[in-house]
Every structure is written in structure tokens, then in C-alpha cells.
Amino acid sequence: MAGGPIFPSSAFPADSTGRLFPSFYAGSGGNAASHDEGLGVRASLDADATWELRFPTPPVLPTGTLKLRLLALANAGAGAAKVTVKDAAVSAGSSPSAAVLTSEAQTTVTWGAGDADKYKEAKVTLTAAPTAGDVLAVALAFNATGWTLAATSTWIASINWE
């Protein structure tokens, strides 16, 4: 049985230069629920920057393939964002900061005409194989090389079993 979503219990912007920040995306649709909270990334990213995330897993794990789901919002009609996910399962009694993270293949999220203010979705299959009650340590590394998105973006991360 598939399961999720599980959202991070902790999100730390490992950046002191303003590339990353807590964000509220203000949608332009005009309804009474037009804001999304998420992980902010500056426009025209000029150096790599990493959000550090922790996802507690449930006491009974769902079946299926573990994936990180990313939803991104930007007021942009063109541009690409590059992100590399790194992950590890950490059991109680172990150090999350000492866990060896496995890098997944780089993911590109592309905005085109008509994509402004719309959710862009990417799913990344994770190598980590947590057991019930583990914590999933994730580094969400936004990559400056190839980054052409010239608008601030807000990212929502969750894990799912599909």
C-alpha cells in the first residue's frame, strides 16, 4: 500500500548569503488561500546552496518505492532550476550529521510559457532504505551551473511511497 506525504520536521537553509530563505509564495489567482509556505531560493542562483531536511518515518512503513516529491512555484515563463538530492536513512542512536548521503541524479525543473504561478512537479527515487521509525536525512542541493531561472522560487518537499 502506498503512503505519504510526509513533510520535513526540520528544514535548515545552509547558506548565510541570502541564496536560501523561508518563503511564502503569493499566488496571483486572487482566492482566499493564495499563499504557499516553502523553501525559498533566490532568482538567478550564482552558487550552489543546500537546504538540509529531516523526515521522520512512521512506525509502520508503507510498501512501494520511496520518492522525494518536489513542488516548485515561481512567477516565471521561462528558465530552468537544477537540484541534486542526497539522502540517507538514520536510525535512533545514530548521528544524522555523520550519515553518508547518497547522491541521486540531478533533476531539472523547467518553466515555459504559461507556467508562471503554477506548481511544477519533480519526483526523485531515493536510494535510502529506511526502516520503521528511522529519520531520513536529505540534502536538497540547488545547483548554480545550468540554473537559468531568473525569478525567486518556492519549493515544497515531501516523501511518498508509490
Image (cartoon, helix red, strand yellow):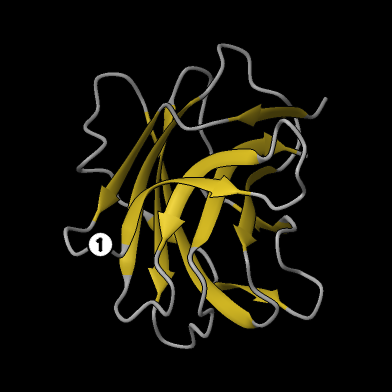
- Looking at the rendering, which quadrant does residue 78 occupy? bottom right
* Left or right: 77 as drawn, with respect to 74: right
Query: With respect to residue 14, does 98 lie above or below?
Result: above
Q: At 44% from the left edge and 24% from the top edge, which residue is drawn?
A: 134
Provide the secondary structure element on which disc 1 rests. Answer: loop
Q: Quadrant of the N terminus?
A: top right
- Looking at the rendering, which quadrant does residue 41 occupy? bottom left
Q: Pick whichever, 126 or 113, lies toward us.
A: 113
Q: Position of residue 118 (x, y in %)?
A: 75, 58
Q: Amino acid at mark 1?
A: Gly
Q: Pick whichever, 156 or 21, lies toward us.
A: 21
* Left or right: 79 as drawn, with respect to 41: right
Query: With respect to residue 73, does 56 lie above or below?
Result: above
Dot 1 alpha-carbon crowd within 10 angstroms: few under 14, some 14 to 19, many 20 or more? few
Q: Position of residue 79 (x, y in %)?
A: 61, 82
Q: At 33% from the left edge and 51% from the top edge, which residue is drawn?
A: 21
List the single residue furthest toward the front: 30
Return the residue at label 1.
18
- Looking at the rendering, which quadrant does residue 73 occupy? bottom right
* Left or right: 28 as drawn, with respect to 17: right
Q: Pick whichever, 158 or 138, lies toward us.
A: 158
List the single residue furthest toward the left: 16
List the single residue furthest toward the top: 59
Q: Quadrant of the C terminus?
A: top right
Query: With respect to residue 147, does 76 lie above or below?
Result: above
